[in-house]
Structures are given as C-alpha cells and as structure tokens.
Image (cartoon, rainbow, N blue to C red):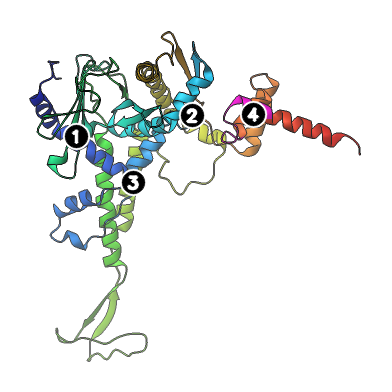
Amino acid sequence: MLAFRRPQTTDVVRITAASRVRKSDTARRLAYYWDRQNDATYRLIAQRFAKPEQFRIFCVNIVRAIADKRASTYRMPPRRTFVGMDQAAGDSLYKAMNADAVLKKASRYLEVCKTVALQVGWNETTGAPTLRVLTPNVLDVVYSDPERPERVIVTYPGERAEDTTFADWTPTGFRMLNHSGAATPVLGNPGNANPYGVLPFVPWFDRLPDDSFWLPGGDDLYAAQDAVNVALASLWRAVELHSHGQAWASGISANEVLQFGPDRAVALPQGGQFGFAAPNAPIASILSAIEFVLRETAATHGVGADLFDLSKVAESGSAKHAGRLDLKEVRQDQIAQARTMEARLFDTLRAVVNTHRPGTIPDDATVGVDFAEQQDQLSEAEALDNARTKSELGVWSPVDVLMSTNPDGFPDRESAFRELQRRRDESAELAVPL
C-alpha cells in the first residue's frame, strides 16, 4: 500500500512504473478474454519443442466462457427507483450514460480483473453524463482505505512511449501530465482544480476487500487456459501425424522407393513384405485429460462441471435450476457488492451532474436498485404456467406478464399498460356483432 502524500510531478512516473508487473498481468488476462492467446501458447510450446512452428495453434476460450457465465448481475437491466427526485429525470440520466450496458461490460471485466473502477464524466457536446469502466492495467490508486481512494492516476498509453499521458486526480486537484511527468495545460482549468470536489471514480470489487485495493485471485483459471491450449495444439499435431497409416516394406534396399496405389501392383523380391503400420497416438487419453481440466475448472469457479459438456441431452427447466445452485450463490455475493457500488455511483453522479447543471439531483435524493431475478430456461408452456400462477396469487398483474414475455418491446410499466388497454379495447370491439 502506498502512503498518501501531497502530489508531486515526479510521483506519477514513480508510482506508475512501480506497478508495471500488476498492469502486465492484467493486460494478459484481458488479452485472454478477448481471444488473443495464440502468442502465449506459441511461447509455451517453444519452451518444450525444438520446432514450435510445426504445431497448429488454436484455442477454446474457457476464460470468457466462465467469466461471462459468472457475471450475471447485469444480464438483465435492474430497476432503479429514485426517492427525492423525479423518476423520469433519474431514468434519463442513467440512459444518457448508457449505464446498464457499461455496467454489464464492467461486471465481466470484474470477473477477469477482480477490481475495476467506474469513471463518471461529462460530455459538453450532449450536455449529459458519461460512464466508462477502467481496468487495473491503466490504473494506479493511492489509499489508506481501499473503499475510499485518496488519489487516482489514469494512464493513457500511446503507440510510442513518448505519446503516453497521465491524468492525476485528487479530491481537490486534477492535472494532465506527459510521459515524463511534466504537467501540461488543461483548457479551462488553469488552476488544476478538481471541479467536482470528489474523485469521479467508483471502485467495484469482486468481494469485500480487506486492506488491499487490488484483489488477488483467478490465477488458476489462466493456468488452466494455458494447459488446455498446449494440449489442443499437441492433440492436433498427433492427429496430423497419425491420421494415416505408415507404409513399410522389407526385403528391398534402403534407398529403393516403391510406387504404390490402388491402381498399381507392388513387386517385391522373394521373401519381401509390404504393409501399413496402424497409428497408435494416445488421442483418447489427450481428449480425456482436456475434458478433465475443463470440467474441474468450471466446477471450481461455480458455473457447473457440465458447462463444456457437449454430449448432454436436453434437460427440463427444473433440472437446469438444480444444476445452477452454486451459480446462484455466486450471484447473491455479486449483488451485495453491486448494491454498494450503485449507491456510491449515484453519489458520484450527483456531484458531477450538479457541477455542470446545478440542482439537477437534490442533495437528499437516493436510489434503490431492484436486480432482476435469475431466470431459469423454461419451456414456453412452463413459463406461461408460472405467469398464470403468479397472476392468480396476486404477485403479478397482466402488466408484469407482458413485460416478462417481451422485455425489449415493453421496458417500462407505462408502455405495457397502454398496450394492454389497446388489446382490451380491440378485443371488445371485435366481440361486437356486425
């Protein structure tokens, strides 16, 4: 942990250089998530084989499969309820910064990196707030309490080292610096002040942090990915070398080349023999080892050992529900962290928006977040039966049923209510005798 000190120009270069190993590891994790694994696999093969170029390298991305499966918090947009301010105005602010899409992406990066930060900004052109996710490969944080950073440094890498710049934030100050740490002028901010009075960053943690901002974990997933990649390359090499039998002949000279084929007769001297040796590559054993790693890795990360099982027959919704108990427990832990993040995000949004449009968000306004329930993959008949039962019990109204069956077409209760009224009037009119 770095001690908080008054920012100095040389601090930025020193701090960012000291975290190079952490940033490199995060960049590798993100590269694996985005299918850029071939170079790493080639290097691993080159450590063991003299001619790595003879291997055909391809990857099955288990990192992204597991990360996306675990990141279920924002799979369906949550419902936010604003207290102390107009509901439509609050919805408009979150829609303007595309909050649900950004948070969905951030939740997946959180599975990869274990710690991310959300930056709230302002778009002068549109006059609306912005939201972006920052990953540890471009971040440095000075803190005493991990949940309340005291200084944030964002690195903007350039194609060349001299093109790299830094943004240095404290609750009262903001500076842009060049690659050597020298301050550069900021248009409209000659005093290098932070206009918001707070850091416009919201940390989001994979789990409750203890005394470290950058949470560890997940190394086993990337080790498993490396093992699977090398095994797949070895498997395909074995297939290429052993997919055909090897011709052999005895009773001829060592340098003699036989011409053979279905339209030729092979002439051998007396006592000579000819045949094909059957391949004996342990392909089944390699496949079994790969499947074992896939199943155990998926089970370890709570997404079910059958995530990579392609031999499964279709299951009912209830069977799938029983198989996802571990994943539901993971989701409950994620929601607890997301609620804390959402509350801090709203406070930060208020500081940024009210700086540019004073009075937009009242000081006493709050937000409540209702995360969508995890939906089981039910058949249409099962889904309709569930909806009917909920309606009969009074848990749902017809509005909820319509929103559940077509969430894209009716994202809010008002539009669903109007559509139901239209359908009722239409049905009544059609029922009138001609």
Nearer the observer: mark 1 or 4; the answer is: 4
Residue 17, percent from left and from top = 11, 32
Asked whether disc 2 touches disc 3, contact meaning CB atoms under 8 Å apart, the reply is: no
Q: Does residue 401 appear in this view? A: no
- The mark found on residue 77 in the picture is 2
Could you tell me how far apart the alpha carbons at marks 2 and 3 are, in whole angstroms? Answer: 26 Å
Residue 122, percent from left and from top = 35, 26
In the picture, measured across the screen, residue 349 lies left or right of residue 276, that is: right
Asked if residue 408 lies in the magenta stretch, the reply is yes
Q: Which residue is drawn at 17% across and 59% down?
A: 52
Kind of residue indicated by mark 1: Lys
Q: Mark 3 points at which residue?
A: 61
Nearer the observer: mark 1 or 3; the answer is: 1
First in sequence: mark 2 or mark 3? 3
First in sequence: mark 4 or mark 3? 3
Q: Residue at x 24, y 31 (%)?
A: 136
Could you tell me how far apart the alpha carbons at marks 4 and 3 are, in whole angstroms? Answer: 40 Å
Q: Does residue 267 appear in this view? A: yes
Q: Mark 1 points at which residue?
A: 23
First in sequence: mark 1 or mark 4? 1
Kind of residue indicated by mark 3: Asn
- Badge 3 element: loop
In the picture, measured across the screen, residue 136 lies left or right of residue 122, that is: left
Nearer the observer: mark 2 or 3; the answer is: 2
Kind of residue indicated by mark 2: Pro
In the picture, measured across the screen, residue 224 lies left or right of residue 175, that is: right
- The image quadrant that residue 177 belongs to is top left
Asked if residue 42 lies in the magenta stretch, the reply is no
User: Depth check: 413 or 261 in front?
Assistant: 413
